[in-house]
Amino acid sequence: MHPLLISAYTASSCLGRGLEPLREAMLAGRSTLKPCDFETVSLPTWIGEVEGIDDQRLPASLARFDCRNNRLAQLGLLQDGFADTVREAMSRYGADRIGVFLGTSTSGILETELAYRRRAPDTGALPAGFNYAGTHNTFSLADFVQHWFGLKGPAAVVSSACSSSAKVFASAARMIASGLIDAALVGGVDSLCLTTLYGFNSLELTSSQACRPFDRARDGISIGEGAAFAMVEPAPASIPRDAILLLGYGESNDAYHMSSPHPEGRGARQAMDAALARSGLAARDIDYINLHGTATPSNDAAEGNAVKGLFGDATPCSSTKGATGHTLGAAGGIEAVIAALAIRNGFIPAGVGTTDPEEGLDYVLTTRRQAVRHVLSNSFGFGGTNCSLILGSPA
Amino acid sequence: MKPTMTNTPAAWIRSIGLIGPGMTDWPACAAILAGDAAWSSERTVLNAPEELPPAERRRAVRVVKLALGIGLQATSAAGMDPSELATVFSSSGGDGVNCHLICETLASDDRQISPTRFHNSVHNAAAGYWSIATGATAPSAVLCAFDGSFGAGLLEALAQIRFDGQPCLLLAYDADYPEPLRAARPIPDAFGVALLLTPERDAHSCGRLAVNLTDDAADTLADPALDTLRCSIPAARSLPLLAAIAARRSGRVVLDYLDHARLAVDYGA
């Protein structure tokens, strides 16, 4: 495929707002996961919470979109001058020539969970003022972002569980290549809610401590929340040396089970193979693999099998979910931003939380300062949906 | 909005699958839309397909039955093996009953939700069950654009066909929500349509479509009852296009999409 220029990017997570705290935490190998104290949730698990989400005030004209997820989206858009970059692209391309493709898994469902506690005792009705379209519906995120900027192009939310905000890069690449748009705002936002905390707990997939991806003693995920955004546009003929490019993507389905990965990592392997093929790169060209690495026993085993099969034990890899938590629908976007930072700043981030990694991989326990040109980032989800992205710097 | 580009995304329609109120399949729907049969709005009948393993068949919720039903109708009509096909799943929401029961449980004193209920809550549940039922490991796009979900799915499918040069199965589907959610999201019943789209014409193609964005208003259906159906279920926003296909009527059809844009579909029979 023709490379796409990732002309701007930003991410906010429990590590902080924008790129600087994320970069610092990656370099220092720091985590900000904490025991779960979210809302009224009583579960023996750890979470990654973004500070100050509820202090965000949406513009009065967009009050119908008010919910934790869209407040987090606005918080994310306001970092690193990202909103200004989007507005500059709008003036260059036209508001109708920029698509909005964002990933989320639960959008603003927290509003519905809270509304159900306030149902009318006699009729069972939800409270007045409950706005399904603006909050609960998964499209609410892209709808909010389009209205926030006044963008007028095509828009969709990709909601394929934990591969969502990796797959938006693929949708954007196809839509730009088809000629319908000139550029796209992509990324993902997912926020803490009761459905995912109690849901993953019911599947016995949450850890009672901070998650330990790829550790031999790993025992489950830590759910986090976050927002990541990027602008993608066709790479110009003359590419600046410090540009970050999307070089390839690969997608697949496991066709195996709704909540367990194929044990050999068949779908994961297929997605990574497809990303390499599309980028024209070989496995030896990849300098770092940002693993999906949720820290559940079966997910990491399946992904490890797929990575070993394709890369052997020679390619440095780690999961950054020990630092950010698993931000579900936002994970692919946040990890694409981490890949961009690794390339731009020359480091391979440590897999925080892990002390005794599975054998057979070059699993990075201490952040390495070294030149990084090509990063493969994996995002796999429920229902057996897989997506791998390859980011890189120009030749 | 800029003038129509000469190079708009386009594809050939190879086959159609459809399930809706009083419509068991595409031939039944086509006869109604062409004016050859009367329509009565009987509640949509959904069955879990035999292709699902027994455990998955038991767990299949309404949107899953609907999506698999329309998808298998389309691949069967085309005589195509679904296991190789890329797919686009587009829906305005997940399964309403499942969502209601999760929210009810989370509002109660005992918040333990069932694992099956949780994994059926993901928006890509239908895509997951489809890949398990058909053995399809090809990519799925899983989209939502609220009432514009059919349009979003059609754009994605056409972009995929342009980019990859491979056939793509578009599945757009929505099912009803129970109270109290129904008061906030008044979708009355289930409706789904699957379009098997190909980059090249073949002997069985039932027309070609090309799509662009427009400021024009969406077309309506002459029959008031059918137009009510079009407006009340997002996937049924496809009906003006399906009516053109049913009548083999070439021309321009405008479909609902987003607040600020509709889809101008250039259909050639």
Image: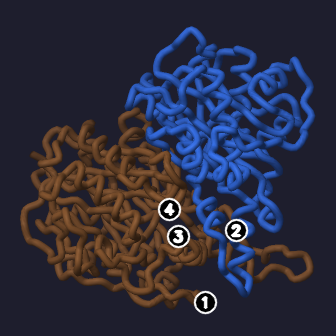
Chain colours: A brown, B blue
Q: Who's the residue at 87% across and 17% down the image?
A: B36
Q: Nearer the viewer, mark 4 or mark 2?
A: 4
Q: Are marks 4 and 2 on the same chain?
A: yes
**In terms of sequence position, does the residue under pointer 1 or pointer 2 come before the other?**
1
**In terms of sequence position, does the residue under pointer 1 or pointer 3 come before the other?**
1
The residue labelled by disc 2 is: A131
Residue type pointed to by label 4: Thr
The residue labelled by disc 4 is: A104
Q: Chain of mark 1?
A: A
Quadrant of residue B72 in the image? top right
- Between marks 3 and 2, how big is the CA–CA gap? 13 Å
Q: Chain of mark 3?
A: A
The residue labelled by disc 3 is: A70
The secondary structure type at the circle numbered 3 is helix
- Between marks 1 and 2, how big is the CA–CA gap? 22 Å
Q: Which mark is residue B231?
A: none
Side of A214 where A325 appears, left or right: right
**In terms of sequence position, does the residue under pointer 4 or pointer 1 come before the other?**
1
Quadrant in which the C terminus of chain B is drawn: top right
